[in-house]
Image (cartoon, rainbow, N blue to C red):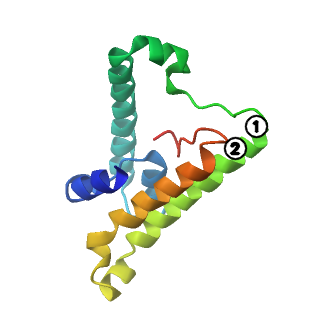
Amino acid sequence: MIFALVYCTAGIFGGHINPAVTFGLFLAKKLSLTRAVFYMVMQCLGAICGAGVGKGFSKTLYQTKGGGANVVNLGYTKGSGLGAEIVGTFVLVYTVFSATDAKRSARDLHVPLLAPLPIGFAVFLVHLATIPITGFSAAAS
């Protein structure tokens, strides 16, 4: 799913669907402050709309699952949950930086076309590793 979303939106707004990635690109000076703030506000509004749609489809399930909020599962400390989230978010942002590096794109012509593939795969692997701990949010995306 992430592969398709990034691939389809890359030409429109750079495929920015995660606030952590947007913030990282801002820190790397690949985005202006105004564009980064705009993207992050829109990402948060999109999350709110998505939560509203989810609640609209199944209010009972929405309420029993705590509105989709992630919590640290039994057997893990809050510190290990925080660590898992930090490492998972780092892996995602690092993969985005590696897959979209301009120097690498110049060297390997296939990179711009296939950049969404490693990003989607990284999201998949990070979810597999962290769902048992916190449910994984990757900076609330």
What's under tag 2, amino acid-wise?
Leu
Residue at left offset 33%, top offset 56%: 3
Dot 2, crowdedness within 10 Å: few (<14), some or many (≥20)?
A: some
Q: Find numbered disc 2 in the image and state the secondary structure of the residue it sits on.
A: helix
Mark seen at residue 82: 2
Q: Tally the numbered discs.
A: 2
Residue at left offset 37%, top offset 37%: 41
Q: Nearer the viewer, residue 106 or 54?
A: 54
Q: Nearer the viewer, residue 58 or 31?
A: 58
Q: Nearer the viewer, residue 16 or 130?
A: 130
Q: Quadrant of residue 136?
A: top right
Residue at left offset 39%, top offset 51%: 33
Residue 58: x %, y % from top left: 38, 16
Residue on which the image places disc 1:
78
Answer with left or right where residue 128 lies relative to residue 32. right
Q: How far is the residue under mark 2 from the one under mark 1?
A: 6 Å
Q: Find numbered disc 1 in the image and state the secondary structure of the residue it sits on.
A: helix
Residue at left offset 79%, top offset 36%: 75
Asked if the residue under mark 1 is in contact with the one under mark 2, i.e. CB atoms within 8 Å, the reply is yes
